[in-house]
Image (cartoon, rainbow, N blue to C red):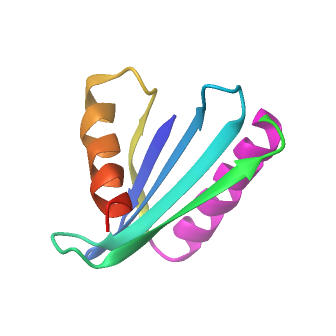
Amino acid sequence: MIIRWESEHDYVLVHVHQDMFGDWIFVRAWGQIGTAYGGIQHALAEDYTQAMTWVSDVDHIQCLRGFSKVLETSDDAPEARDAVRQLSLLDAR
């Protein structure tokens, strides 16, 4: 699952997926749109329920900050490739 929120200048992107060991990984990336400024954080969730709780928390916070949800898709959707590519670029720094 990939979800992206945007404001006029900033974005937050969350990626929830299982790794090859079956663990649930929660990845949160943030930054300024059109720049290399930002960061990325990985967290290991105890289970899918905890990961979805974290997604709900991020959604609540971003809505309070005036961000709008602009993307919500599964990992196998075409839009997901671009979002994951963005995470890979942030992770390489």
- Say which quadrant the C terminus sits in: bottom left
Residue lying furthest left in this view? Answer: 34
Q: Give the range drawn in magenta.
A: 48-66
| Number of numbered discs visible in the structure rendering | 0
Q: Report the magenta stretch's main SS.
A: helix
Q: Is 92 left, or right, of 44 in this rendering?
A: left
Q: Residue at x 71, y 54 (%)?
A: 54
Image coordinates for residue 32, horizontal then vertical, percent: 28, 76
Whether 59 is among the magenta residues is: yes
Image coordinates for residue 65, horizontal then vertical, percent: 51, 77
Image coordinates for residue 6, horizontal then vertical, percent: 35, 63
Q: Quadrant of residue 41?
A: bottom right
Q: Quadrant of residue 19?
A: top right
Position above or below: 89 against 20 = below
Q: Is 51 left, or right, of 7 in this rendering?
A: right
Q: Which residue is drawn at 64% across and 51% down?
A: 55
Image coordinates for residue 86, horizontal then vertical, percent: 28, 52
Q: Is 17 left, or right, of 53 in this rendering?
A: left
Whether 1 is among the magenta residues is: no
Q: Which residue is drawn at 84% across and 43% down?
A: 46
Q: In which quarter of the image is residue 7?
A: bottom left
Position above or below: 74 against 93 = above
